[in-house]
Image (tube, coloured by chain):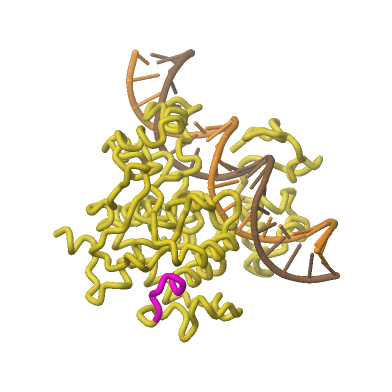
Chain colours: A yellow, B brown, C orange
Amino acid sequence: MRNPSTSAGGAGGTNKTTPCCSKVGLKRGPWTPEEDELLANYINKEGEGRWRTLPKRAGLLRCGKSCRLRWMNYLRPSVKRGQIAPDEEDLILRLHRLLGNRWSLIAGRIPGRTDNEIKNYWNTHLSKKLISQGIDPRTHKPLADSSRDHHAITNKNNASSSSSKANRNSTSNPNPNPIIVLPSDLEENNNKMFVSANKESGYLPNTSFDDGYTSFLSHHVSGLGFGSNVNVHEGTTSNEEDEDTNYCTDDVFSSFLNSLINEDAFASQNPQQQQPNGNVTLPAESGSDALVSISASAFGLGAGWESAIMSASNSFNQSEHKTAKERVE
DNA sequence: AACACCAGCAACCGCATCGAG
DNA sequence: GCTCGATGCGGTTGCTGGTGT
């Protein structure tokens, strides 16, 4: 929806490189029905991919990025239009608490919804909703706590539940939750794995839901001592650093994440014990005291992952799995 | 009726990552 | 191991339409 006349460098703007659409003659801004039809027809016939050359082949005066975005967020047959249902909203909340602003990962768990749609919905609805409930949308903790823990950031980003456009986007880098302190004997191994999976950002690389993240969790679930309980990877432990350790089926991962989602509410009802230094220890009840050893501060890991792993440790070590809701009730 | 303000959302940007050569 | 093109992601922008004054 940008004004086509305003070109390069707008957002976040360093203007270091030339936007791909700035080539003379390439159209920008809203898509017309004719363009949609051209794109949809072409992709239905030839399939997705080769986005760079697609516009030319399809007869569109657009850049490849723009075509890809239009297809992914709007034209794809699987895209569900319309209001986000309450159960979807609940799922988004839970996933966001676990994953932070990993919109594509969240979208991957919600059929028919795109990362852009979820991101927009979060920024326009859910973050405000949480704020109105006294919850920091970044940390999912009570605002009082969050403001103590993240004073500067909160001031900057959440200056308003108000409506200033300048302050609308208050969800920049989440980061939320406290650090987990874990036994040191496992720390070394886990560090190695995390280092390979995480860059300076402290988050996972931008990989698809089914590859990087899956293998990441595959590694760590197996590395966390779930062993035979968890069929993340049959017969392989974290000590067997072969290619096979990257294997994890969608079904397994799916149920794994489902358990995280369910456990999430439980975790929120039973907050971890916070230490004076701001770190957090796992509840003894989990039986996981020796399971996980991650010194997140050592490598700047985003805390959402600790939450996930911690929750997973709870989940997989309980032979009789109950969902959080069941327990609360 | 005219204007101002605001919320929602489609689209764009820069950057990170991946994979082929 | 390096380079470079392709792709994907998260953050941000600004147009549009609705609502209030």
Q: Is residue A198 above or below residue A172?
A: below
Is A8 in front, or is A143?
Answer: A143
Q: Is residue A236 above or below residue B21?
A: below
| Residue A3 in view (yes/no) | yes
Q: Position of residue A29 (x, y in %)?
A: 64, 40
Q: Position of residue B5 (x, y in %)?
A: 43, 19
> How many numbered discs?
0
Q: Is residue A241 above or below residue A26?
A: below
Res A110 → quadrant: bottom left
A213 with respect to A97 (left or right): right
Residue visible at 38% across and 75% down in the picture: A226
Residue A226 part of the magenta segment: yes
Residue visible at 42% across and 76% down in the picture: A252
Residue A85 part of the magenta segment: no
Residue visible at 35% across and 33% down in the picture: A148
Q: Residue furthest bottom?
A: A235
Of the 4 image quadrants, the one containing the C terminus of chain A is: bottom left
Q: Residue furthest front?
A: A185
Of the 4 image quadrants, the one containing the N terminus of chain A is: top right
Residue visible at 62% across and 67% down in the picture: A44
Q: Which residues are magenta?
A: A221-227
Q: Position of residue A136 (x, y in %)?
A: 35, 39
Is A32 in front, or is A75?
Answer: A75
